[in-house]
Image (cartoon, helix red, strand yellow):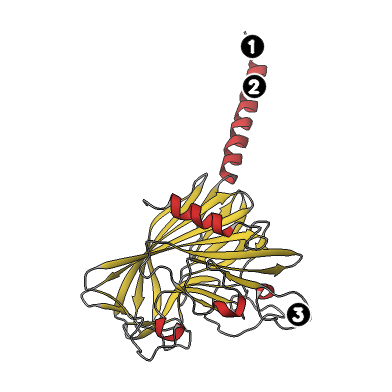
Amino acid sequence: MIPVRTSVRLLAFTLALAAASISGRAADGVRITDQAGKVRVEINGQLFTDYHYKDVPRPYFYPVLGAGDVPMTRNFPMRTVPGEETDHKHHRGVWYGHQLVNGISFWGETGKEGKIVHDKFLELKSGADVGVIIAQNKWVAPNGSVVCTDTRTIRIHNRKNERLLDFDITFSAGTEELVFGDDKDGAMSIRIAESMRLKHPKGSGDKPTGHIVLSTGVRDQDTWGKQAAWCDYYGPVGDKIVGVAIFDHPANPRHPTWWHVRDYGLFAANPFGKRHFEKLKDPKAGEFKVPAGQSVTWRYRYFFHAGDDQAAKVAEHYADYVKTTATK
């Protein structure tokens, strides 16, 4: 028979081991936590991003940290940092918006635009391999009327030495036809870290600039307004070369999308700006209509990586994205 005192010690030791095991598992994988106004996303105990949804012009992700905790987005307007440009205050981290939806802007922040208002979460789920955020939003005009709704399914993957964020968005028209107007300002967007830009940021001197690459092989200044399956923007952050690619899913309407990608750091997949991108006279050339009561879905992936597009094997990752999401 084991003495009582020894038995108590063994029980305490067993409970301590169990607690440590549970704590360790909690730190592993993708952890999704609602913090009343933002959803915190951690990967293996490290912050990846915050999804801001309360009292904002539109929901957005900021900060976004790549593998190795490298900041991938500009700080302004969430934070003012010396040396950063303060243009386009509506360029908030990673976001979705569009300049013309039933004639209303859901892009800028002059006070005259509509707002994308968080309605509710349909799912917040942590997981060892994938974390999930499913949110429903209302696109509200300045007069208070609801133009449309969206349901966005966001999946964050637990991968070694890289970060993957899938963003699927379904728009549902109400009792009236939904019209996405032809404009260059939209839709699936990121404002990259200042030092990664193709154009020299303030005070950079002769530091190396970033580069832009399309799946078609087109590079740098020639990429704006071109169509391609994916686009990669890479450059220096501190002493590292890092990048972010956006993948346009083959099932998306108007695939391959046009790229509204600028030398100063704006980077967006935009299927609605045909008139601007192809320099056409027809102001409705890129218009996209959704009949009343119907819906349409676009799917994207953000691939945050180390190195340039070749070192990160962006083309291979795109092929894997297509293969693994073909039936989802």
Residue 158 lies, in percent from the top left, at 55, 49
Residue bearing the label numbered 1: 2
Instruction: Say whether residue 287 is left or right of residue 299.
Output: left
Q: Residue furthest top?
A: 1
Q: Nearer the viewer, mark 1 or mark 3?
A: 3
Q: Which residue is mark 2?
A: 10
Where residue 319 appears, as percent x and y from the top left, is 49, 55
Give yes or no for contact between labels 2 and 1 (Cβ–Cβ under 8 Å): yes
In the depicted structure, whether residue 151 falls above or below residue 191: above
Mark found first going from the N terminus, 2 or 3: 2
In which quadrant of the rendered image does the N terminus lie? top right
Residue named by callout 3:
204
Q: Amino acid at mark 1?
A: Ile
Q: Residue furthest right?
A: 206
Horizontal side, residue 32 vs residue 313: left or right: left
Q: How many marks?
A: 3
Residue at 59 percent across and 65 percent down: it is 244
- Within the image, what quadrant is residue 271 found in? bottom left
Answer few, some or many: residues within 10 Å of disc 3's Cα (few below 14, many 20 plus, some between 14 and 19). Answer: few
Helix, strand or loop at disc 3? loop
